[in-house]
Image: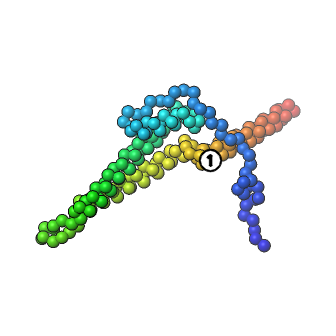
Amino acid sequence: MGVRQKQPNSLAGHRSKGHLLELVRPAAPAPEPQKEWRAATKDEWSLFWLSAVAGQVDREADLPALVELFTLQNEIRQVRDERIEVRRMVRRLWREEPFTEGSQGQQRANPLVSQLLTRLGQLDTSLNWHLTQANRLREDFGMGPLKRFRLGWSIAEGVGAFERMKRILNAGLAGDDEEHDE
């Protein structure tokens, strides 16, 4: 006979119903985007501030991290564009002049192709780093349906813990009053 590792009520689909995060659209206008951002990043910034998630942003505390996120998004676009251009150059160079003459007159692979492939590797590394950082910040801000859902559950769990703590403290304080009445 097998041993059940989880209680039946903790299995998927049987979670307690906590308070869900209520998203409210922001009342204040969007802060100005950074001047150096590309048009696509500025558009994304404007759309973010129209979303209900933006209503949860503390403009004083969260704005630097939010600007960092959109700066990363802007840099991701730049790196992707450069990757596309380098790949085009590699293909064109390999098609038109794959070999050159070496110092001893021998045929050798075009060194420009090797240099471009090295640059492509650097761009891939940079892109992965930028994506990792951006995804961390996107999760912090609850961007995306799954991230909003997880954030809602985290807040609901926090609210539930806070309510339990209040009940315990209130019960403890009520007990203290009874001891002092004697």
Along the line of sight, which residue is nearer the eye, 160 or 46?
46
Residue 111 appearing in the image: no
**Total marks in image:** 1
Check the image and report above or below for 82 versus 90. above
In percent of width and height, residue 42 lies at: 43, 36
8 relative position to 37: left or right: right
In percent of width and height, residue 76 lies at: 41, 47
In the image, farthest residue toward the left? 104
Along the line of sight, which residue is nearer the eye, 136 or 43?
43
Check the image and report above or below for 134 versus 61. below
In percent of width and height, residue 161 lies at: 70, 43
Give the quarter of the figure containing the N terminus.
Answer: bottom right
Residue 156 appearing in the image: yes
In percent of width and height, residue 72 lies at: 42, 44
- Dot 1: few (<14), some (14–19), or many (≥20) neighbours within 10 Å? some
144 relative position to 18: left or right: left
